[in-house]
Amino acid sequence: MEIINILFTGRLIKELGSLLDSSEALKGKNLRFIPENAVSMEDLEWADAYVAFQPTENFHFGNFKWIHSLGAGVDRYMALGKWPEDVLLTRTITSFGQKIGEYTLSYMLKDLQHHDTFRNQQGRGEWKMVAPRGLNEVKVVIFGTGEIGQEVARILAYFGVKVYGVSRSGVGKSHFRQVMPLEELDDICLRDADYIINTLPLTAETERLFDADFFEKLNQVVFINVGRGGTVDPDALLAAMDSDSVKAAVLDVFEEEPLPVGSPLWSKAGVTITPHISAITTPEEAVACFLETLECVESGRKIRNAVDPGRGY
C-alpha cells in the first residue's frame, strides 16, 4: 500500500510536526498538521491516511486507505459504524503496559501500606499501629489479557501477587496463574479477590460489563479501571460502594471525559479520580510507533498493531 498524503490532527500536532519535520521516512510525502476544529471536508478527502486520537466531528472516510489511532483505544473510531473493508485501522502500541502496571501498583501499595490511615492519624497526633499487608498476600483479577494486561500481570507477579486473568477466549497467558473465559467466570474467584483491574477495550460485549450483577459478586474489593469508562455502570459502582462490595475505586477513565462537574463520583468517599493519565502517549512514542507502522503498511510486512474492526480491538 502506498501512502502519499497524511493528515495529522489533535492535541499533539505541534510536537509531531516538529519531530517529523526532518524524517527521511517521510520524504516525498505530503503532510498536513491541522487542529481538530479546523479540519475541513477538503482535508479529509485529500488524505490517504488519517492520524489522530479520535475522528473529527465532521469525519468521513473519503479516500482513506489507512487510519492510525495515536492512543491504544479505538472505541471512538468503532463508534463511526460499519468499518469499510478497504480501510486499515491501526493503534499506537508503546510502553502503556509498563506505565499502567506502575499506576496500579502505586495504588495497591497505598492501600496495603495504609497511607491514608497513617496520614489521618498524623493529623490527630495519634500513634496507633496498623499492620501493612504484603503484596504476596493478595489476589488480583485482571480483566483483559492483551499486551497491557500481560504487562500488568508480569509486574505484579514479580512481587508475588497471585494474578488471575479474564478474557474473551480464556486462553492461558504468561504471568497469570489461570485465565478464565468471560462467559465462564467463577463467582468464587471474584469473591476471593482483593483487587479487580480492568484493562478491557470498549466493545459491544464489554459495554456496561461491570454492572450491579457483577459488583454483587465482590467482597470488599478495590476496583481499578484503566480500560474504558463505558465498561462500567457508574450508578452500580456507587451502590456497590454503599453496600461494601467495593471498598474503594481508582478510576482513570470515564464514559464522558472530562468527567462532568456534577458527577457524584467526584465527592464519593473511597473514590480516587485521575484524569486519564495512567498511560499517556508521549510525542516521541507516538512518532516511533507511527513510523514503524507506516514502514509495515508500505512494505507489506506484518502489522502487529492492526485492529480487527469486527472485534473492536
Image (spheres, grey):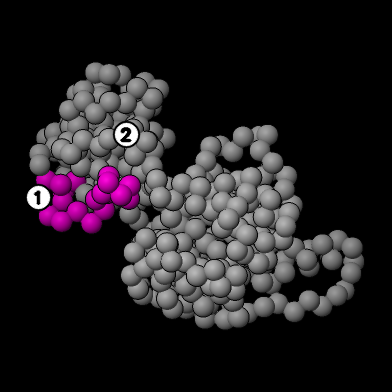
| Magenta stretch: dominant secondary structure | loop
Q: Residue 8: horizontal and vertical position, in percent?
A: 30, 33
Relative side of 138 to 199, left or right: right
- The residue under the point 54% across, 53% down is 210
Q: Is residue 119 above or below residue 37?
A: below
| Numbered mark located on residue 299 in the image | 1
Please rate how many residues cluster around mark 1, counting C-alpha atoms within 10 Å: few if below 14, some from 14 to 19, many from 20.
few
Q: CA distance from mark 2 to mark 1?
A: 29 Å
Inspect the magenta stretch and tell me whether residue 278 lies in it: no
Residue kind at label 2, given as amino acid type: Gly
Whole-percent x, y for residue 72 in the image: 37, 49
Q: Is residue 304 magenta?
A: yes
- Callout 1 secondary element: helix
Q: Amino acid at mark 1?
A: Ser
> Percent position (x, y) of residue 275?
56, 45
Q: Is residue 91 above or below residue 247?
A: above
Instruction: Answer with left or right where residue 161 lies relative to residue 51.
Output: right
Q: Where's residue 133, x and y in %?
A: 67, 78
Bounds of the magenta segment: 294-313
Identify which residue is drawn at 62% across, 64% down. 218
Which quarter of the picture shows residue 177?
bottom left
The residue pinned by badge 2 equals: 81
